[in-house]
Image (cartoon, rainbow, N blue to C red):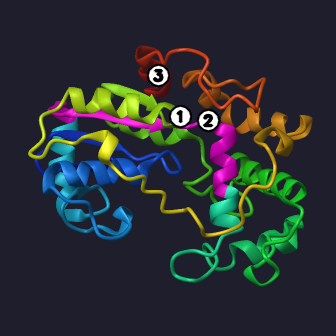
Amino acid sequence: MGFPGTWMTESESMVYRVVPKCACSSIGQIMYYSDQGRFYDGDIHDAAEGLHKWALERSQPMIQENVTAHRSYAFTCVRNPYTRILSSFFDKICGIQRNGKRYRGNLVPMLVQKYGVDVGSPENGFEFDQIASFRRFLLFARDTIRWKKPMDPDIHWSAMAGHISTFIVNGGRYDHIFWTERFDEGMQVVLDHVTTPHPVVLAKVPRFNESEGHGPKRAHPVEAYFDDLSRHLMWEIYKRDFQLFRYDFDNPANKMPIGEIDLEAVHAKLGR
């Protein structure tokens, strides 16, 4: 199986397991800059040079060798499950993608037909009942994750624990896992542990939010989208995410973690 979703600097200073919707654009650009002395011109997910990625066949032997020998500092980044699934909804379901089309072609029409999801359109200013549509989307996300119907779960809303576990199960070990909500603090820990060809000053790094501006803005506070049933579904899908990465399930309004991540527990529980 190898190490899907894993990126590594060409200098092999650091290894990162990508978790979608968790500041991956910013992290990728920082890694790229630390080697190249410049940011990638475009979406870092499109970069086919300047950064080793498991998706690039020529990079696989180097990543495989590095990770199994634990030669470099390895890390990943997580995000509050409530805000992550909302971000996925507004970006991937409601938004128009970089190519000018809807995400995954027939996905949105299928959601409209089978789940009654309304996503608005640029023509009507994305006017629609965001709360009702999001809750229907959440039911769909649960169905994909629980039963793989009507399709396999998408990487943007499948559980973070699932992404993070492949790295461990296949022989990798994390040195650090940090929160998107405390990004600068967490990323600084990584930079303090590595030596890079070009020094990175986080205060000078622009924010790379590639999903920004694709679709409608969230019209309500986070907690408004989650009634009792929605929270029940969230626990069913993301129980391990809440527990392992120490997020507050009981209060959707609190996006901040409520405890420290226990790396040993993460490796023990996700390494089975």
Which of pointers 2 and 1 lies earlier in the amino acid sequence? 2
For the residues labelled 3 and 2, say whether their Cβ atoms are less than 8 Å apart.
no
Q: In this view, does 145 lie to the left or right of 221?
A: left
The magenta stretch is 68-88
| Towards the viewer: 37 or 148 | 37
Q: In this view, does 75 lie to the left or right of 104?
A: left
For the residues labelled 2 and 1, say whether their Cβ atoms are less than 8 Å apart.
yes
Question: How crowded is the residue under tag 1: few (<14 C-alpha within 10 Å), some, or many (20+)?
Answer: some
Name the residue located 56 percent from the left edge and 23 percent from the top edge. Answer: 244
Name the residue located 67 percent from the left edge and 35 percent from the top edge. Answer: 238
Whether residue 135 is visible to the viewer of this picture, yes or no, is yes
Disc marking residue 181? 1
Q: Please give the residue where the numbered disc 2 appears in the rendered image.
A: 80
- Image spot of residue 72 (x, y percent): 18, 34
Whether residue 169 is visible to the viewer of this picture, yes or no, is no
- Image spot of residue 261 (x, y percent): 48, 19
Which of pointers 3 and 1 lies earlier in the amino acid sequence? 1
Q: Please give the residue where the numbered disc 3 appears in the rendered image.
A: 266
Magenta region includes residue 73: yes
Q: Is mark 3 on a helix, strand or loop?
A: helix
Disc 2 or disc 1, which is closer to the eye? 1
Which of pointers 3 and 2 lies earlier in the amino acid sequence? 2
Kind of residue indicated by mark 1 = Glu
Disc 3 or disc 2, which is closer to the eye? 2
Kind of residue indicated by mark 3 = Val
Name the residue located 55 percent from the left edge and 25 percent from the top edge. Answer: 245
Disc 3 or disc 1, which is closer to the eye? 1
| Towards the viewer: 21 or 211 | 211
Gap between marks 2 and 1 measured at Cα: 8 Å
